[in-house]
Image (cartoon, rainbow, N blue to C red):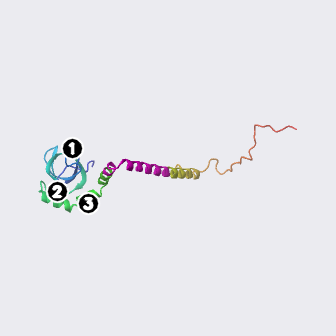
Amino acid sequence: MVFERFVETGRVAVVSGGPNKGKLVSIVDVIDQTRVLVDGPETKVPRTQIRINQLHLTKFKINHPFTASTRVVRKAWKDGKVLENWENSVWSKKIAAKEKRAQLTDFDRFKLRRAKTRRNKIRTVSFLALRKAASRNGTLYGKKRMAKGGDKPRPSKKAKVDKKKPAAKK
């Protein structure tokens, strides 16, 4: 199946625009193809209609009946531990990191840039050392290879005879 997140009763979503931007809500009813009725009892979002294109659907779903009251939605929200699951999700952590980066001062950004530069230098030096070692033992491209020429010993530089200079005649 291609889609896993459907607009359905009980689906938890994040509001992407308007006064409740960034808050979690639960879909209570589908009004038509473009609008839904949402309620966010634990996130202080009143029961209201909202356009579907203003929602980001999450993987979380709670079980409550069609057009349930706010009291029933609140109970299902707590039973489903939606806020705990949301806080542990990668999506939530990315949003928190983005907010933290937005609050950095100029000096904090400078310190962060310097730390990244140092980290990258250490990483590059260790990578080059590993690559050099792999190149020497022949495992750079996956399989260990024999040196060219098989088992024949290579002649030393001193043993080479210079062919350019003719031998002296006597």
* Label 1 to label 3: alpha-carbon separation: 26 Å
Question: Taken as a whole, is the magenta stretch helix, strand or loop?
Answer: helix
Which dot marks residue 121? Answer: none
Badge 2 element: loop
Circles 1 and 3: CB atoms closer than 8 Å:
no
Residue where numbered disc 2 is placed:
41
Relative depth, front residue between 138 and 110: 110
Q: Is residue 144 visible?
A: no
Q: Which residue is mark 3?
A: 84
Mark 3: which amino acid?
Glu
Q: Nearer the viewer, residue 111 or 170?
A: 111
Instruction: Check disc 2 and give the amino acid type.
Output: Pro
Task: Out of 25 and 100, give the one closest to the viewer.
Answer: 100
Q: Decide if residue 152 is on the left or right side of residue 64.
A: right
Q: Position of residue 122 (x, y in %)?
A: 49, 52
Q: Amino acid at mark 1?
A: Asn
